[in-house]
Image: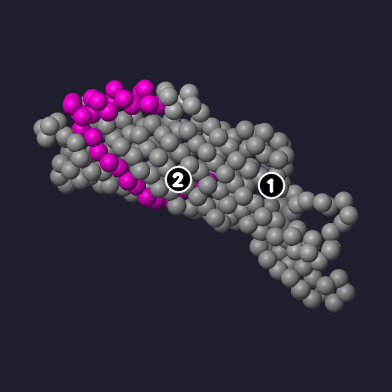
Amino acid sequence: MKTILLITALFFIPILASAQFDQKMSLNFSVGGFETIGKKYGEIDVYQMPNYKIGPAFNLGIQFQLNNRLSLLAEAGFMFSHSWNYSDQNGDWIYWTIEDSISGEEIENGENYLEISNYSFSLKPLYYLNPDSKFSPYLFAGISFNYTTAYYEDTYWNALNEMNLLAQDDTEPYIPFLEKNTGLGVNPGFGLEYSPGKQFHFYFSSSYYFMPLQSKNFKYPEAKENFHALVFQFGTRYNFIKTKDL
């Protein structure tokens, strides 16, 4: 981790110096949503990643204009989803009920809980296809360093445990999901920027987010999968350093 921070610092020092004396620099902020995608069924019954519901995605960064067409964006991001929708060939993994063994009446019901959060720091080269127009499409391909966490609560198992309805050998709930992961990811995409003036710019971007996840971070290695998501965001960019102003 210290090596990564040192390399990042050494990379940015000359860029910052150049931005102050030769280039334009802008502050970027975007907000939108992401949806995880991927294979829902496979060798095991439970795959968590494709089953999250749409969640919010936020980004804050500094963009350096290297030339008329090429810019470099250093960006911090956060994505999370606190809800999911999972069912497979064997039934529903979310909602549950407990019935009286004699009368058949419902005595308890609930919902299992699964969330995911991802913190990222990324570098994104942006290439503007028509930089002199008010409407300029652009392409980008980001490389990100990610810290991902997931939390699952089996409230059904907890309820059975409180009622002393578990088998003697059932000592803990079955949790095959990811717990946490640290690693690199890629984020290619495209966008459209609208520039009504020289200081403020507004943009929309669409991208694909991929992170390889490590099997050792799953309680059951056979449950290992990767993170795939589609991200859509609206943002604004504000130029606060320009060559002519210095």
Q: Is residue 50 above or below residue 67?
A: below
Q: Which mark is residue 78?
A: 2
**Residue depicted at 53% across the width and 32% down the height:** 183
Number of numbered callouts drawn:
2
Q: Does the magenta-highlighted stretch encompass residue 33?
A: yes
Q: Report helix, strand or loop for mark 2.
A: strand
**Residue depicted at 68% across the width and 52% down the height:** 88
Query: In the rendered structure, which segment of residues is drawn in magenta?
Result: 8-36
Query: How is colour applied across the structure in the image?
Result: one colour
Q: What is the x, y in percent for residue 210?
A: 50, 36
Q: Report helix, strand or loop for mark 1.
A: loop
Q: Is residue 205 above or below residue 188?
A: below
What amino acid type should be assigned to the residue bearing mark 1? Answer: Val
**Residue depicted at 25% across the width and 25% down the height:** 17
Give the quarter of the image for residue 132.
top left
**In screen coordinates, is 131 left or right of 30?**
left
Reading the image, the residue beneath label 1 is: 46
